[in-house]
Amino acid sequence: MTTDPKHLTDSEASVEARRLITEAYQPTPEPRPMTFRDTTPVPAFGPTPPVPQPETRIVPEWAAGVAVASIGIGAGVTGLGCGAWLIFQGLSSVTLLGVIAIAAPFVGVATVATAIGAAISKAKRSSTTNIYQGTVIKRTDITSTARGIGARSRIEG
C-alpha cells in the first residue's frame, strides 16, 4: 500500500479516507489534573519541615518589565495624588489675614521696584526740546476699497 495520494487506487483511497475520518472524530481523552502528593511522613509533633516545590513557570522579560513599570507608574501617581491632596488641604484653610501676611513682602518689593524704575525714568529724561523744521502736512484723504472677504481701509497720502 502506497501513501502517495497520486498513486492510490480507489479502494486504497477509500480505506485511507475512512482511517482519517475515524482518527479525526476520535474523542480526546480528558487531561489529567496536575497534582502533587507529598509522601513524606508527617512528624508526630512540632512544625512540619518545608517541602521543596520547584518553580516551573517562565515569565517573559517583557511581562516582567510591564509589571515593574506599572508598579512604578502607580507609585508615582499615588505620590502626585498625595501632593495634590496636601496642596488642596492647605488652600482650603486660607484666610484673608493669611493672604495679606504672605503678600505683604511681595507688595513691598514691587513698590520699591516701581519707585526705583520711576526715579531712573525721570533721571533719563532730559530737558531737550525738539525743534522741528519744515512744513507740516496733514492729510485727511481716506480711500476705501472693499473687495471680497478681506475688506481693508487705507489712508493714502
Image: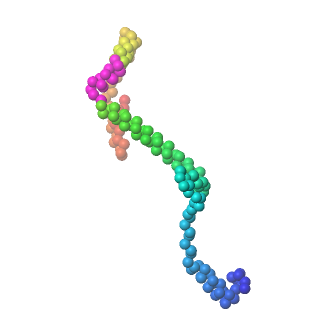
Hey, which residue is sitting farthest bottom in the picture?
A: 11
Depth check: 11 or 6 in front? 11
Image-based side of 139 in relation to 20, left or right:
left
Q: Residue at x 36, y 46 (%)?
A: 148
Depth check: 119 or 108 in front? 108
How many callouts does the rendering have?
A: 0
Q: Residue at x 56, y 69 (%)?
A: 32
Q: Residue 133: image x %, image y %?
A: 38, 15
Image-based side of 31 in relation to 115, left or right:
right
Q: Residue 66: image x %, image y %?
A: 53, 49
Numbered range of the magenta stretch = 94-108
Q: What quarter of the picture does the N terminus occupy?
A: bottom right
Image-based side of 53 in relation to 104, left or right:
right
Q: Residue 113: image x %, image y %?
A: 37, 17
Residue 132 seen: no
Q: Residue at x 53, y 52 (%)?
A: 45
On the image, which quarter does residue 92 sit in?
top left
Residue 109 seen: yes
